[in-house]
Image (cartoon, helix red, strand yellow):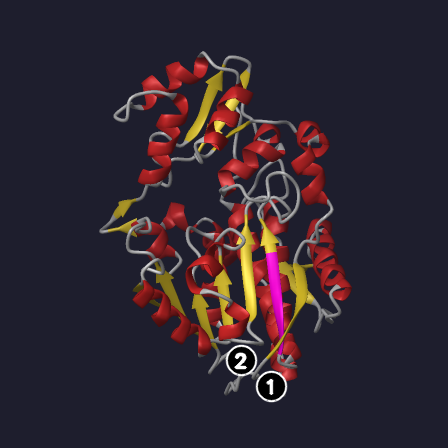
């Protein structure tokens, strides 16, 4: 297929990325043209899903080249492979465990009709399932039909409010206008696509051994993220040669297929940061790290291990969240499917009477690549200044 310039949404996303970094005092000038064959019907939807995916991957590839250039290593041409991009973003649909396809959502995760509209729930994890059932005031062993019956008798806003009160995950399905006019929608719209902020701490600079194929060789990454977006970011850094250690809490085991799908190229371990010995071990690992990726809500990690900047001054810290860092929803949990439902995407992608969804968890994957890109550009400065890099699914 002939190479074509990226569709306008891709160029717009890369422009937003470059603008966000420029506002943070970092240079995200492209290292060359981006070539992309015609994707055809890959990731086809009403919304430009392939454009989002390709734009995020292109931002990551360009940032990798800026790392190469900063290290005196020859940059690589950026030629995107639509089939590989689609396969990466749709990995859950391609994955087989012992030859068997996986089911990406549990029985209580999905759309439910409410009295005045629709809600979307997320209950893939046992603790989220238990909280959802408590929020709905149904028995702990309730199945999908019982939950559906309960939600049909409630207003969608009532379900959403009850979920927040019980730290469960359920949102009212909104259309785009409703989201844009809402307080959380307005707040996240003002945030940069990738936020990079300087901290006051200053520390040692990483001592990598970069090559063209592995520009992050010798760089150590500590990864405490879960599910998809954060692990995609650390998987991307591992692809560039970084040594990545993923840390999971033993009391909240990760869903098996997600750990396998997004764990490629990493080491992994279980560590209870609530235990003083576990926290001490983590601080020792942190002191030797160059990059930390986190999905914890603000202050949660510090509450367990103390002042991160005191342990490792000059650290590059990457954070992914669902709803942005400002506004009334900043502290809430969320997942790709939930953000799609609340932000109007599910309404746009509706099929008939019911809300719909994108053909992939595109917000997760794109946010992961954008976080990796921001971390790369923050790292490439090489001045020892500590920096925080943040992305959110809602802004993506």
Question: Which one is in front, 244 or 248?
Answer: 248
Tally of numbered tags? 2
List x then y, in percent, for residue 45.
58, 38
Quarter holding residue 374: bottom right
In the figure, is residue 30 to the left or right of 205? right
Q: Secondary structure at mark 2?
A: loop
Neighbor class of circle 2 (other Cα within 10 Å; few <14, some 14-19, many 20+) is many
The residue lying furthest to the left in this view is: 98
In the figure, is residue 242 to the left or right of 271? right
User: Quick check: 180 above or below 263?
Assistant: above
The reply to whether residue 242 is in sight is no
Question: Which one is in front, 113 or 325?
Answer: 325
Circle on res. 73: 1
Give yes or no for contact between labels 1 and 2 (Cβ–Cβ under 8 Å): yes
Mark pair 1, 2: CA separation: 8 Å
List x then y, in percent, for residue 256.
30, 51
List x then y, in percent, for residue 296.
48, 54
List x then y, in percent, for residue 208.
51, 85
Image quadrant where one finds the N terminus: bottom right
Q: Secondary structure at mark 1?
A: loop
Q: Is 140 colored magenta in this rendering?
A: no
Q: Is 386 colored magenta in this rendering?
A: yes
Circle on res. 375: none
Quarter holding residue 147: top left
User: Quick check: 301 above or below 66?
Assistant: above
In the figure, is residue 53 to the left or right of 243? right
- State the residue position of label 2: 215
The chief SS type of the magenta part is strand
Q: Residue at x 47, y 54 (%)?
A: 300
Q: Residue at x 62, y 53 (%)?
A: 38
The magenta-colored residue range is 385-390
């Amino acid at each position: 297929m002939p190479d074509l310039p990226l569709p306008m949404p891709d160029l717009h996303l890369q422009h937003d990325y470059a603008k966000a970094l420029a506002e943070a005092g970092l240079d995200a000038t492209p290292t060359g043209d981006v070539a992309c064959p015609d994707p055809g019907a890959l990731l086809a939807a009403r919304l430009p899903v392939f454009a989002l995916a390709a734009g995020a991957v292109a931002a990551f590839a360009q940032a990798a080249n800026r790392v190469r250039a900063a290290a005196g290593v020859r940059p690589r041409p950026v030629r995107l492979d639509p089939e590989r991009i689609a396969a990466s973003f749709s990995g859950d649909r391609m994955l087989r465990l012992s030859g068997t396809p996986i089911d990406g959502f549990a029985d209580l995760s999905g759309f439910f009709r409410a009295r005045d509209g629709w809600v979307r729930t997320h209950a893939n994890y046992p603790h989220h399932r238990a909280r959802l059932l408590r929020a709905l005031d149904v028995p702990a062993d309730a199945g999908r039909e019982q939950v559906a019956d309960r939600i049909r008798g409630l207003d969608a806003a009532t379900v959403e409010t009850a979920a927040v009160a019980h730290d469960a995950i359920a949102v009212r399905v909104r259309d785009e206008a409703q989201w844009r006019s809402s307080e959380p929608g307005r707040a996240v719209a003002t945030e940069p696509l990738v936020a990079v902020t300087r901290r006051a701490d200053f520390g040692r600079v990483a001592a990598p051994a970069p090559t063209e194929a592995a520009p992050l060789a010798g760089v150590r990454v500590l990864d405490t993220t879960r599910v998809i977006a954060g692990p995609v970011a650390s998987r991307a850094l591992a692809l560039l040669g970084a040594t990545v250690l993923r840390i999971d809490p033993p009391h909240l085991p990760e869903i098996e297929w997600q750990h396998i799908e997004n764990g490629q190229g990493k080491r992994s371990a279980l560590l209870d940061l609530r235990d003083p010995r576990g926290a001490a071990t983590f601080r020792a690992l942190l002191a030797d790290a160059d990059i930390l990726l986190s999905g914890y809500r603000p202050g949660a990690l510090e509450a367990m291990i103390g002042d991160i900047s005191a342990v490792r001054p000059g650290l590059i810290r990457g954070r992914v969240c669902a709803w942005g860092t400002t506004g009334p929803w900043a502290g809430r949990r969320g997942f790709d499917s939930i953000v799609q439902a609340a932000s109007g995407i599910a309404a746009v992608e509706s099929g008939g009477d019911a809300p719909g969804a994108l053909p992939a968890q595109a917000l997760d994957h794109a946010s992961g690549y954008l976080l990796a890109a921001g971390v790369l550009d923050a790292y490439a400065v090489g001045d020892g200044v500590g920096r925080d890099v943040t992305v959110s699914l809602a802004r993506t």
